[in-house]
Amino acid sequence: MGTQITMTCQEKMKTMRITQYSNATSAKTKNRRVTVQRSSDGEGFNVEFLVVDGDTRPRSFHNLERDKMVVTTVGITNESAMALLVCLLDELKRCGMADGAIKLFKEKQ
């Protein structure tokens, strides 16, 4: 019987490689990459998830509810969630909004 190896969040963060581009931040882990890029109008962000694991089933779904609301659901791993937070925080810092986001998060707890 094999030994199961699990990594803590801190260990996963140490293996994550962060790359800053002029218009985006990317976090790379084993077989995964999360990229957050400022939208072309500067009013938001585009998020890209790249996964190389041989599973080609859809990981995101768009549903139209009541003929007017578009609901998008994206399934990501815990590791990808951490990478997304790192990239979003970096992009928010660049546009001067990180402090406000962190303050809001702390107030909601």
Image: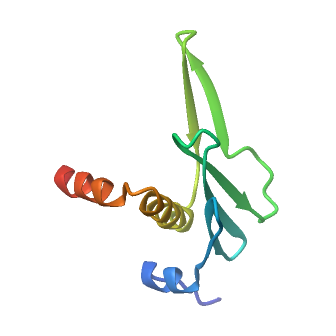
Compare residues 68 and 37 and report the one nearer the observer. 37
List x then y, in percent, for residue 39.
61, 44
Compare residues 54 and 49 and report the one nearer the observer. 49
Q: Is residue 28 above or below residue 66?
A: below
Q: Is residue 84 above or below residue 2?
A: above
List x then y, in percent, for residue 92.
44, 57
List x then y, in percent, for residue 37.
62, 54
The quadrant where residue 96 appears: bottom left
The quadrant where residue 19 appears: bottom right
List x then y, in percent, for residue 68.
54, 12
Compare residues 41 and 56 and report the one nearer the observer. 41
The residue sitting at 61% across, 24% down in the picture is 63
Quadrant (top left, top right, bottom left, bottom right) of the C terminus: bottom left
Q: Is residue 69 above or below residue 32?
A: above
Q: How many marks?
A: 0
The residue sitting at 52% across, 10% down in the picture is 66
